[in-house]
Each structure stands twice: as C-alpha cells, then as structure tokens.
Amino acid sequence: MRHRITAICHKASFSLSTCAWLAIDDVPIEVWLAQHLDEPDLALNGLALMWLLDEQEDALANRRIVPAADGTSTLVPLLVCSDDMDFDCFALMTEQVVEGDTVHWRRFGHSATGGLEVGVSTHWYAGSKPVSFALSDFNQALSEHKRLIKACVGSEG
C-alpha cells in the first residue's frame, strides 16, 4: 500500500509560527510517524528539512531526502530535536530505498552519530513497519516544500 506525501504549511506544537512541512496521508509528518512507530515522543520533534540551524546539516538533510537512482539506499534524517535543532541531540532516521516508481522508507531508527556523520551508526527500531510512496508524488512534495518555505511564513497553516 502506498501512502500519500504532500507539502503543507504547518504550525508544529512546539513552534511559534507556521512553516513549510511534510504530511503523510494529510497528517503532519511528526504526528504521523509518532503514531506509525508507536513512539508518542516523536511528535515533539521538528522536520529535518526545516528545523536545522547549522547550514551544512541543513544541506545534508535536503540532499539525502532527494530520491537517488533506482535500486539505491540512502540514510535520511527525518526528524530532529525541536529544542537543539541539530543532529547532535536526536535524529530519527529512515533507510530510503528507490525501486522503480516507488520510494520506500524500509526501516526507522535513531542516529547514534551526530553532526555531518548523522546516520553512520543507527539504532534501528525492531519491527518498524515500512512505508511506501509513489516516486512522482514524493518528488512533487519535495518541490512544493521548497516553494512553501517562503509562502508559509506568517500564514495560518
């Protein structure tokens, strides 16, 4: 079963303002992942594509989430600690695999390494269920997310 990924304007529970965000099946990503992985505290984390203070970490997160060639696997940081806004506090990782016209998030875990080494060592969650998206929808969501970065500021979300 494929899930739907989209870009939205969202005001996270810990945020003072609205910003560009991702949603899965119309649910903000941090809330959806908290439910999907049965880890309620994940809902308190920020989207790695928006929530990083360090420019190099931000660039790394934005580079890694872009689907690579068919048959490849990439370790992608999805969520980060909303307090520290970096990879050193907490980073929820996924193994992103591209197969034909589908992007799979095969497994999830938290990084045991921080900074630009995020995901090099990862504690994978036992029994985490994979998630799949249509490659075209995934790419559209990333493109729309970039557009919304300026459009969402100050909006109601």
Image (cartoon, grey):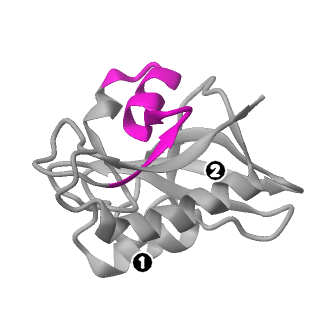
Query: In this orientation, does residue 70 appear?
Result: yes
Find residue 140 and report its horizontal and vertical position in percent: 63, 60
Q: Amino acid at mark 2?
A: Glu
Q: Which residue is mark 2?
A: 95
- Relative horizontal placement of residue 31, taking residue 125 as reference (left or right): left
Q: Where on the picture, by quarter, is residue 45? A: top left
Residue 52, compared with residue 128, is above or below; it is below
Find residue 48 and report its horizontal and vertical position in percent: 38, 57
The N terminus - image quarter? top right
Crowd band around label 2 with a 10 angstrom C-alpha radius: few (<14), some (14–19), many (20+):
some
In the rendered image, the residue lying farthest to the right is 100
Q: Residue drawn at (39%, 52%), measured in percent from left and top?
A: 21
Is residue 107 shown in magenta? no
Find residue 92 and report its horizontal and vertical position in percent: 43, 45
Find residue 56 and report its horizontal and vertical position in percent: 35, 80
- The mark found on residue 36 in the picture is none
- The mark found on residue 59 in the picture is 1
Residue 120, compared with residue 10, is above or below; it is below
Is residue 31 shown in magenta? yes
Q: Secondary structure at mark 2?
A: strand
Q: Residue drawn at (64%, 50%), measured in percent from left and top?
A: 95
User: Magenta part of the protein: which range?
Assistant: 20-40
Q: Which one is in front in this view, the residue at disc 2 or the one at disc 1?
A: 1
Q: Residue drawn at (42%, 77%), measured in percent from left and top?
A: 59
Asked whether 132 or 57 is in front, the reply is 132
